[in-house]
Amino acid sequence: MNLAPAAPNDSLSDSGQKNSRRYAVFFANRWFILGILILARMAVAFQFQSVAAVGPLLVDELAIDYAVLGLIIGLYMLPGAVIALPAGLFGQRYGDKRVALLGLVLMTFAGLFMGLTADATIFIACRIVSGIGAILLNVLLTKMVADWFASRDTTVAMSLLLSGWPIGIGLALVILAPIGDAMGGALPMLITGIISASIAVLILAFYHVPLEAQKAAATFRIGLSGREWALCLLAGLVWSCLNVGFTLVLAFGPSFLAELHYSLAEAGVVTSTAMWTMIPALVFGGYVVERLGKPNALMTTCLFFSAFTVLGFASGFAPILWCALLGVLLLPAGLIMKLLVASLDARNRAIGIGVFLSCYYGIMAVSPLVAGVLRESTGSSAAPLWLASGMYLAAALFFGTFRVVQARLSAVN
């Protein structure tokens, strides 16, 4: 008599093992990892935009003016001017995952405390802490994606990562403004802390460094040539002015529309339109630039039209249409990153991008304060929008300067 275990039990065991392996492969898949990292970038953008999304409420609840509100908005970026360069070094020394988790922990506690305090000083201190965490996370997200997609699909992965920023900002405008209208300005801050904590759990549970990156030697050198320094700074100015122009519309657009008798929720929906049209523009922009074959003309044209579009928004006529167009005009934005990388020696890319980002974060931190002061001094809610228009024109000027310097220095070398 055959007393061997029944076959069905073996089949069930084999099936369970196959399912376990299948789940393990799925959670280790680089596209699944990329999805988590995109969510992390969305969380950063969501928290950045949270203050602007309920700005008029915070002005009343914290007993501050719009100049201080501008300062608070900009403080999220200010640490980047100092931290962008060493953030990558911390990742090399202590591990990307650990430093990214540290950033999320700082964002979590800062968001929670911002929702629990009515003291402007404590609120500002927490905003700085959340900004530090965001910079640590943001710098490392790019490296973490590069580690997983270094061999192939790099452009696609980076484009998808970049799209997480406008999605996060758009969601903050659409979600937090109605919540603020109904519940006050504290709850939106608490929500940003809860989201950051959730992303930290995902990264802790699922992210791991790919084998190729584990084997890479951690080295650091500052060997930028004079040409590279010049081009990095000019590219940083182009990128900064472009982003400042766009961000000021998102930050001060809701308060401008509020004076035109829009509700806070309606103003959030209108300004978020720029973010939704920006997403496909960023994803397909690289293909369009390559297809047209005239990157200089396209970039300059888009920057000039962006300046005009902001003035159209400031006129108060059909603001949702102007916002939609502003997002579309970001189509060639990826060209700036491409030109920056092409201008750097492969050994200097890390430090060059660090210089580039330091410039960006420094200017992004100061500009909302300047816009807030301009609004207070002129008494016009449209004043920050005039500044935004001027920043697009400045971006066009710096872009032209970049191309001229690039051509002349290349000819000398």
Image (cartoon, grey):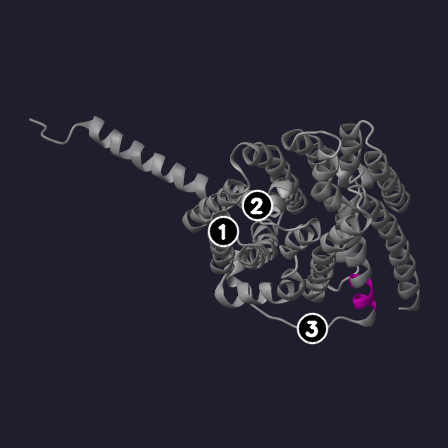
For residue 382, side relative to residue 368 (left or right): right
Disc 1: which residue: 117
Image quadrant where one finds the N terminus: top left
Q: Residue at x 55, y 41 (%)?
A: 185
Q: Residue at x 47, y 53 (%)?
A: 109
10 Å crowding of disc 1: few (<14), some (14-19), many (20+): some
Q: Amino acid at mark 1?
A: Thr
Q: What is the magenta range?
A: 227-232
- Measured as percent of width and height from the top left, residue 269 is found at 66, 30
**Residue 228 sits inside the magenta stretch:** yes
- Magenta span main SS: helix
Disc 3: which residue: 222
Residue 184 sits in quarter: top right
The residue sitting at the left extreme is 1
- Pointer 2 or 1: first along the chain: 2
Q: CA distance from mark 2 to mark 3?
A: 46 Å
Q: Amino acid at mark 2?
A: Glu
- Element on which disc 2 rests: helix
For residue 157, side relative to residue 284 (left or right): left
- Measured as percent of width and height from the top left, residue 196 is found at 49, 47
Q: Amino acid at mark 3?
A: Ile
Q: Residue at x 76, y 41 (%)?
A: 286
Cβ–Cβ below 8 Å for labels 2 and 1? no
**Residue 364 sits inside the magenta stretch:** no
Disc 2: which residue: 61
For residue 14, side relative to residue 54 (left or right): left
For residue 306, side relative to residue 58 (left or right): right
For marks 2 and 1, give the one nearer the viewer.
Answer: 2
10 Å crowding of disc 3: few (<14), some (14-19), many (20+): few
- Element on which disc 1 rests: loop
Q: Is residue 160 visible?
A: no
